[in-house]
Image (cartoon, coloured by chain):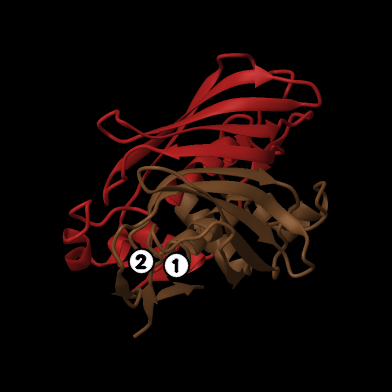
Chain colours: A red, B brown
Amino acid sequence: MTTVTNITYDELTLGQTAQFSKQVTKDEITLFATLSGDHNPVHLDSAFAAASPFKECIAHGMISGALISAAVAMTIPGPGTIYIGQTMSFLLPVKIGDQITVKLEVLEKNPKYRVKIATRVFNQNNEMVVDGVAEVRAPRDKQTINLPDLPKVTIS
Amino acid sequence: MTTVTNITYDELTLGQTAQFSKQVTKDEITLFATLSGDHNPVHLDSAFAAASPFKECIAHGMISGALISAAVAMTIPGPGTIYIGQTMSFLLPVKIGDQITVKLEVLEKNPKYRVKIATRVFNQNNEMVVDGVAEVRAPRDKQTINLPDLPKVTIS
């Protein structure tokens, strides 16, 4: 079983970094379309997308938001974090097959356990696709959690 | 086949509203955990969540982000919209089974087809769970699209 240990408010240091990486394939796009209800063909139909400004299918921009949220929940501060806010600027499209890396950097430690974290998202060519900032309430207590197995998801 | 027609930049009016609604069930949480990689038990394990500050499993906050993005893509401005940015403040947790409604309102029409849209997210008790603003480049051209069928997603 996989475990994850958090970084508490007291342990966090300004400038501290972490990163979280995941490939965005057709499967992630199908799952996002299914859960969100956004069935726009620019994400799903390559013939339609070929005539769009992007010339090919692109990922829903908010998939990067999902990866940012996972980065914050799984790395720094990790388990026990309460999400307060997020800003995102979408700079470049994410294409099918891109290997996406969320790079986190602690920007501010404020009263009441509030922390601001830069959430910069890059593709495999080191181009920034999303810039943004998360605000969280960092955990007070050290915590190691077991990650539960997920139900099996099959796409057919 | 379902079709969706967009609202062009010229057609959008200040104060114009639209809404988009979806229930957040255990399935949406499983799909979000699978696509994002956030397997935190506070979203997935009811025994673990019972000991958390929320007392029960809650949805990943960014699921509301996914629904906001779908609302913008499917209602106003709809197809042809390019997402520029999004801010979100997470005000209240979304619980399993909540019926979530994203209410959009056109706040600003700016040069270069840029539009700011309030993206307020409510639960079935009319409590605001997320407040935020989307910035988009609205479509210039009228467009009606056919929504493609999605691959079948099975959770077991």
Cα distance between the residues tagged 1 and 2: 7 Å
Q: Quadrant of the C terminus of chain A?
A: bottom left
Q: Residue at x 31, y 68 (%)?
A: B142
Could you say which is closer to the camera, residue A152 or residue A34?
A: A34
Q: Residue at x 74, y 20 (%)?
A: A110
Locate residue A38 relative to residue A114 in the image: left or right: left
Above or below: residue B85 compared with residue B42: above
Q: Secondary structure at mark 1?
A: helix
Could you say which is closer to the camera, residue B25 or residue B17?
A: B17
Q: Position of residue A113 (x, y in %)?
A: 77, 26
Above or below: residue A103 compared with residue B27: above
Circle on res. A40: 2
* Tag 1 residue: B74
Q: Position of residue A3 (x, y in %)?
A: 60, 40
Mark 1 touches mark 2? (CB < 8 Å):
yes
Q: Residue furthest top?
A: A14
Q: Amino acid at mark 1?
A: Met
Could you say which is closer to the camera, residue B61 or residue B100?
A: B100
Does the image show residue B44? no
Q: Quadrant of residue B27?
A: bottom right
Q: Position of residue B141 (x, y in %)?
A: 28, 62
Does the image show residue B42? yes
Work out whether disc 1 and disc 2 sit on a shared chain: no
